[in-house]
Image: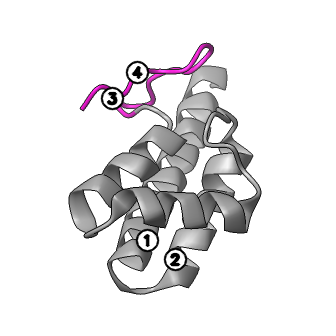
Amino acid sequence: MSITAQPGDRLVYGLRRPTLDDARESLRRSVADPAAAWQELLTQTGLTGAETDAGSVASMARAMVGSGGFIGLCGNALSIRITAYTALGAVEELFAAA
């Protein structure tokens, strides 16, 4: 996998923020026609695939979950990663402030 951290990203307890590249890679590993699935998801979300913000990744995860099947499973996994990263980041900030 050739996914790199985005500028300004930080590791949170060893985890990096999930990206659209992660979403696309999960499709590549899970569905028969990942290019078509990816294009359909981009169309549904109005994304280009080049976005790097957390909101775009969350939108993609929701669209993937809504697709059901293996795409939905990939979306669930992405949602779990987003939630874990966000929650652990909040905990890390609380400890840093203490």
Q: Which mark is residue 14?
A: 3
Of callouts 2 and 4, which one flags the residue occurring earlier in the amino acid sequence?
Answer: 4
- Does the CB distance between marks 2 and 1 fall below 8 Å? yes
Residue denoted by label 1: 76
Count residues near mark 4 (Cα–Cα under 10 Å), then give few for <14, some for 14-19, many for 20+.
Answer: few
What residue span does the magenta drawing correspond to? 1-15
Separation (CA) of disc 2 from disc 4: 24 Å
In percent of width and height, residue 39 lies at 55, 58
Q: Mark 2: which amino acid?
A: Val
Frontmost residue, 61 versus 41 = 41
Residue located beneath label 4 in the image: 4
Report the residue marked by disc 2. Answer: 65
SS at mark 3 in the image: loop
Q: Which color mode does the image show?
A: one colour
Disc number lying in front (3 or 1): 1
Q: Secondary structure at mark 2?
A: helix
Most common SS among magenta residues: loop
Residue 95 falls in image quadrant: top right
Residue 19 in view of the camera:
no
Q: Is residue 13 highlighted in magenta?
A: yes
Image x and y of residue 83, in percent: 53, 56
The spot of residue 34 in percent (x, y) is: 36, 60
The reply, left or right, for residue 57 in relation to residue 74 is right
Of the numbered discs 2 and 1, the one sitting upstream in the chain is 2
Which residue corresponds to the image point at 41% horizontal and 44% vertical from the top-left? 22
Q: Nearer the viewer, mark 4 or mark 3?
A: 4
